[in-house]
Image: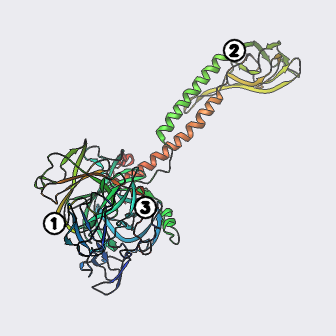
Amino acid sequence: MTRPIANCPNCGAKIVFRWSNSVQTVCDFCKSILVRTDVDLKKVGQVADLPPDSSPIQINTEGQYGNQAFVVVGRILYEYDQGGWNEWHVMMNDGTSAWLSDAQSEYALSLSSKAENLPAIAQLQVGQQFTWSNQRYTVSVITPAHYRGVEGELPFQYWDKTDVTFVDLRTESGKFATLDYSDPEPALYLGEFVEFDDLKLKNLRSFEGW
Amino acid sequence: MSAGTPPLSGPPKPQPKALNCPKCGAAIVLRSFGQAETVVCGSCRSILDAQDPHLAILQQFEAATREVKPLIPLGTRGKLRGTDYEVIGFQRRSTSVDGIAYYWHEYVLFNPYKGIRYLSEYNGHWNDISICKTLPTAEFGGAATANYLGETYKHFQSADASTDFVLGEFPWQVRVGEHAAVTDFVHPPRVLSSEKLDKEVTWSIGEYMYGREVWDTFKLPGAAPEPMGVYENQPSPVTTNVTGMWVAFAAFAVFLLVLMAGFDMRAKKAPVLHETYQYNRAESKGESSFVTDVFALTGHPSTLEVKTYAPISNHWIYLNYALINQDTGQAWDFGREVSYYSGYDSDGSWSEGQQNDAVVIPSVPPGQYYLRIEPEADPSLPGIPYTVDVTHDVPVFGIYGIAFFALLVPAVIISFRAYTFERSRWSESDHPPLDFSNISTGSGDDE
């Protein structure tokens, strides 16, 4: 796989893309948020220092999902009234992108999915049911969240956000869905909860005393 | 575990945070690297906002009754299911049934990679609890059950749980005085619980742990307190599957019957001697023994049954038998008594003994045999006829009876123990078994 290389338009540091389809990245050095255009990189914003968080995952953490290896290339950090959670952007070894979410050490892996007629946020309430890919999902919680920051590479532009709403749906079989209302058009992610040990993670952060 | 991965350069290693209580200044350690929502000052009992760098005071509570001391001190670590966990929080909760308060304790366990887990303790009974990732389905109503990962859990109890003492860190906004509706469904050794706080319902799954396992896990000094009574999801000491055991028992009984029928069909049951003799006291002075005709036993070594019949009443006759092989002189000596008594007394008619007797001699080799018989009788009995029947190769059923009872007795004992254990379990539930002793006396003699 080619690894496009460019320089940060802000500070000149070398920018390496691990994933060729990345649309956005953050300069490790000056924390500029950079968006790829047809020809070069454009600085669109600046990431404030991310708040300290407790996730054991970090950029470059490697793991396994099913028979596919993956590497963490980016993340979006959110906050809500019960704490914060991370959506880690992972690159599978077949080149697809997926999301590994870590909410207080509850891990889930999901993929962006397409479905017709996704419900508008105003119509939704807890307990409502939807069927996607022959699986029935029940709305379990509607979470008003707050965008806190980004790191690394993302498959889309994502930086100028404030309040966003997520709708979590669960099933009776460990699968889940998330409706992301960050943009006017809702986005659907389908996935499942995963066990920490099953992910066989490497390059984790270490914690003092552990 | 990848916990031993060497640290990468980059963001600083998270460290437990040492802070001071804004109320009393006492030292506060945040052990969960930012996962805690609230932390309780161990000194002044202020509930503080763990997410706030200044630890804003959220609530203060009086340890109204008395100090509650966790059995596992905060900060203790232990290996549970292969993962190291540290005790970071502790709360006491209570529920009131008929005006009596029942208390239980919950411990918050933390691992920076695996997250949060809980231990609960009630009267020496422990549960290892984690939050359900899969949504259980619950059906309330007549037969209230819940289904989780393909297993059916039976409704045990619904209660209102209030938090009345807290210590350490919690991954949620804990408050003293907070009420939650708790519903437990059991499938021993597991318990499925739903906890409803405001509108949010959280399901958790617990597995029974013995106090000694907890003591081993956390290397606690001394011995775990003895559990009191039977707990809702305590595994029955009767590990046998009672239904399966009875199915196996029935199959074995059928097998025995088939075996009996088979041996009965195979047995020749050949009559070899049938003779009636007369006992006469007058004639039997001195040596009274005599020998029977010779009879032949053919085939393989087999059983020989000797039946004696005497039509006596309120007397006894005793026969000294010897079965003698004519060729080898080998002898089997045995004595049989026939006695029968009957009469009337204040309780009505009674009887004792029988006019028939039978005995089986095992494994008699083939050959020519005769019986030597020496009768003795009651001195008051002048004379009596008696009949001797000898049958070769009879089936022996006694051994089947012994086998049957040898299996029946433990099966009944196991069933009874299982029954009494389940009865004690469910007597504490919202669905107590009917108490027949109470119904018959018609009084509720509560202590």
Give me the residue at 50% from left, 62% from top.
B213
Specify the subunit that label 3 lies on: B
Residue placed under numbered mark 3 in the picture:
B126
Q: Are marks 3 and 2 in contact (CB under 8 Å)?
A: no
Count neighbours of disc 1 (C-alpha within 10 A) and say few if under 14, some if 14 to 19, many if 20 or more.
some
- Dot 1 and dot 2 within a common chain: no
Can you give x and y, in whole percent of width and height, for residue B285 in the image?
87, 21
Which callout, 3 or 2, points to the residue nearer the camera? 3
**Label 3 to label 1, Cα distance in Å?**
42 Å
Q: Secondary structure at mark 2?
A: loop
Q: Secondary structure at mark 1?
A: strand
Q: How is the image coloured?
A: rainbow
Residue placed under numbered mark 1 in the picture:
A163
Q: Which mark is residue A83?
A: none
Do we see residue B200 in this rendering? yes
* B222 lies left or right of B86: right
- Position above or below: B366 against A101: above
Instruction: Examine the image and state in which quarter residue A86 appears.
Output: bottom left
Can you give x and y, in whole percent of width and height, for residue B81 in the image?
46, 60
- Position above or below: B36 against B273: below
> What residue type is disc 2 on?
Lys
Which callout, 1 or 2, points to the residue nearer the camera? 1
Residue placed under numbered mark 2 in the picture:
B268
Task: Please name whichever residue, A78 or A21, is drawn nearer the observer in this view of the structure.
Answer: A21
